[in-house]
Image (cartoon, rainbow, N blue to C red):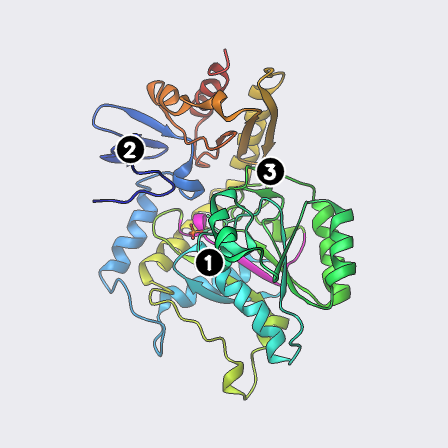
Amino acid sequence: MIWYPYEQMKTMKSPYKIVDAEGVYLYTEDKKLIDSVSSWWSVIHGYKHPELNGAIESQLEKFAHVMLGGLTHEPVQRLSDKLQSLLPGDLDHCFFSDSGSVAVEVALKMALQYYMNRDETRRTMVLALEHAYHGDTFKTMEVGDDEDYHFVLKAYGESKNVIHIPTEIEALEKAFAEYHDRLNCFIVEPLLQGAGGMRMYDVSFLKRARELCDRYGVLLIFDEVATGFGRTGNRFVADLVLPDILVLGKALTGGYIGHAVTVANHKVYEGFYDDNPSHALMHGPTFMGNALACSVALKSIEVFEEQDYMSNIRRIEEITRREMDGFSDPRIKEVRIMGACVCIEVYNSDTIKGYQQFAYDRGVFSRPFLNYMYAMVPYVIKEDELVKVLTTMKEWFQ
Ligand SMILES: *Cc1c(COP(=O)(O)O)cnc(C)c1O
C-alpha cells in the first residue's frame, strides 16, 4: 500500500483520485477542479500540454535514459547550453540531479568542498534563514528550519554547523560579524520562502547579503527551486542579485518529470578544476541528465520565452491584487501577494480546517497547510478561472 507524504496515515482523509488532467484542470471520476497548487508549484504550463507532450514523445523514440557517467547526449547538452544563456552573469556550470532536495545537497557539498579544496578547513558553517525549507533529505533538513522535523533536533540536538537568522539586515550583519571566518555559505530561498509559510521579504536584504558575502569570501546560494521561472514576478531572483550557486527544480521540467539543476559560477567551478583528482566533485545521481526530463525542460523553457510568460505572471499579479483589494477579516493576520503567489495567513490554523473540501465542492483543488491558505496557479490560467480560485478563498471567510 501507498505511504502518503506529510500525513498521519492513521487519520488521513482519503486523497482525491485523479483520472485525467488537461490545462489548469484536474479530473476526478465526477469532478472538474482547477489546480490552484500547480502540483506543488511545478506545472506552470498546465497539464497535457501538446508541445511538452510532443517533446517527450519524440525523445522516447530515441531513448528514455542513458547515464551521464562516461556518456553524454544531445538533450542534456542543449539544456545545459540553454540554461547557460538564460541565466544571468557567469552561472554557467550545470550539475543535474533528480530532485530539488538532491540539487540543494549538491549545492551545499560544492560550497563546503570549495573551501576544503583550498585547505580553508575552518569554514564548515552554513548561514540559513529562519523558516527556511530546502528539502527533505538530511542536510537540507539541517539547514532548513521546519517544525515538522524537530524530531531530528530531539535526536541529535542543535547543529553546530548551521545558524538561522530572520530576514532582517541587522541580524545578517551581526551573523557575519560573528561567524564570517567560519562560514562557507549563506543559503536562502530568495524573496519568497515557500514551504515555511509563503513569507515574502525585500530585495535590499539580498543586496546586503551579496555585499557581505563578497567582503568575507562567503558563497551565496539561491535555492530557486520554488521561485525560479517567474513565480515571484521576476524570471529568476538571480536577475536582481547574482548568487554564486543557483538551484532550480520544480518548474524546470514544467512539472512533467522530477529533475533539478545546481548551477555554479566560474569561481566555484574553478575551485574544483585542477590536476588533483581528490578535488573533483564526487557526486552522480543515477538519473541525472535524464533524456526525457532534459527534452521536456528545453521545451518548457522555449514555451516560457516564446509565449512571454512574464507578462502572464504580471497579469496574474494584477488580477490577484484587484480581487484581494480591501479584503479583510478579523481572523486573518495578513494577505500577501508576490508575482503569481498569494497567501492568506490566519491567526489560528483551525480557521482554515475544512477549506480543502469547501474548495473541492466549488471546483477548486487547494492544499492549505498550518496557518496558510494559498494559491500558486499555473501561468496559463484564464482570468475567470483565477477569479474563481480567489473568490473561493474569500467566500470561505463569509
Ligand atoms: C520543493 C523545494 C525543495 C525540494 O525539492 P524536491 O524536488 O521536493 O526534493 C527544495 N527547496 C525549495 C525552496 C523547495 O520549494
Q: Mark 1 belongs to which amino acid?
A: Phe
Q: Residue at x 45, y 30 (%)?
A: 368
Q: Residue at x 75, y 59 (%)?
A: 176
* Residue 279 relative to residue 303: left or right: right
* Secondary element type, mark 2: loop
Q: Which image quarter is the N terminus in?
A: top left
Indicate the quadrant where residue 71 lies.
bottom left
Q: Residue at x 55, y 69 (%)?
A: 110
Q: Which mark is residue 15?
A: 2
Q: Residues within 10 Å of mark 2 (few under 14, many from 20)?
A: few
Q: Mark 3 belongs to which amino acid?
A: Arg
Residue lying furthest bottom? 275
Q: Residues within 10 Å of mark 1 (few under 14, many from 20)?
A: few
* Secondary element type, mark 3: strand
Q: Position of residue 307 (x, y in %)?
A: 47, 42
Q: Which residue is mark 1?
A: 138
Above or below: residue 47 compared with residue 321: below
Of labels 2 and 1, the one closer to you: 1
* Residue 316 relative to residue 37: left or right: right
The residue nearer to you, when weighing 125 against 235, is 125
Q: Position of residue 104 (x, y in %)?
A: 50, 59
Q: Residue at x 30, y 30 (%)?
A: 13
Q: Which residue is mark 3?
A: 199
* Residue 396 relative to residue 346: left or right: left
Indicate the quadrant where residue 99 lies.
bottom left
- The magenta segment is 241-253
Above or below: residue 254 compared with residue 178: above
Q: Is mark 2 within 8 Å of ligand 1?
A: no
- Looking at marks 3 and 1 on the same chain, the residue that comes earlier in the sequence is marked by 1
Q: Is residue 29 magenta?
A: no
Q: Mark 2 belongs to which amino acid?
A: Pro
Q: Position of residue 49 (x, y in %)?
A: 33, 42
